[in-house]
Image (tube, rainbow, N blue to C red):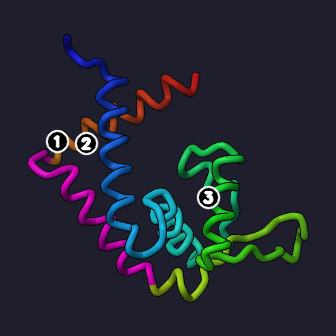
Amino acid sequence: MEKDCGVWISILSHKLKKRMDARMQSMGITGAQSHILHYILVKSADGPVFQRDVEKAFSLSRSSATGILQLMERGGLILRESVERDARLKSLVPTEKAALLDAQVARSLIETEKKLTSGLSDAQLAFFKETAAQMSLNLDG
C-alpha cells in the first residue's frame, strides 16, 4: 500500500524531532527549544520578541508556546521582561546562557538541514517548500 502525504509528513516529522532532540540533549534543551531559542536570539537583535511572535512563527497554540517558553525560562535560557508601554506584555529576552549556546544550536540546525535536504536540487527544494506552504494553507481553511 502506498503511503499518502499525511503519513510521509508524519514520518519526516518524527525522524526530524528524534534527530534534533538527540543533537540538543548534550546542551540540555530539546529540538523544539533549539528552534525557538535561535529565533528569539535572531529576532531580538531587531527589537522585542513576544510570545505571540513565537506562536505565529512556529504555528503553535498559546498553551504549547507557554509550556515551551516556561521550560526555557526555568532552564535559564530566557527572561520575560515587562514592556514600558504595556505592563501586561512581556518581551522574551535571551540570557547570556542562551547566547553561549547559540553557535552550537545554529551549527546543529544547519547540519540537520543539510542532512535533510542532501541530494535534492534547488528546484526540488523550491518545489517542496511551495507544496508544503500550500498544504499548510489548505489545513488552515
Relative to 115, is 85 above or below?
below
Residue lying at 31% horizontally and 34% vertically, measured from the top left: 11
Residue lying at 38% horizontally and 74% vertically, measured from the top left: 26
Q: Earlier in the sequence, mark 3 or mark 1?
A: 3
Nearer the observer, 8 or 82? 8
Q: Circle 2 sits in a helix, a strand or a loop, which is it? A: helix
Farthest residue to the top: give it: 1
Which amino acid, mark 3? Ile
Please state the horizontal and vertical placement of residue 96, each as a whole percent of the image.
Answer: 56, 88
Which amino acid, mark 1? Ala
Please state the horizontal and vertical placement of residue 31, each as a whole percent of the image.
Answer: 43, 59
Q: Is residue 39 left or right of residue 20?
A: right
Q: Circle 3 sits in a helix, a strand or a loop, which is it? A: helix
Q: Is residue 19 left or right of residue 53?
A: left
Q: Which residue is mark 3?
A: 68
Q: Is residue 100 left or right of residue 118?
A: right
Q: Which residue is mark 1?
A: 123
Neighbor class of circle 3 (other Cα within 10 Å; few <14, some 14-19, many 20+) is some
Q: Earlier in the sequence, mark 3 or mark 2?
A: 3
- Callout 3 touching callout 2 (CB < 8 Å): no
Nearer the observer, 41 or 97? 97
- Callout 1 touching callout 2 (CB < 8 Å): yes
Span highlighted in magenta in the image: 101-121
Marks 1 and 2, Cα distance to the nearest angstrom?
A: 5 Å
**Is residue 69 inside the magenta stretch?**
no
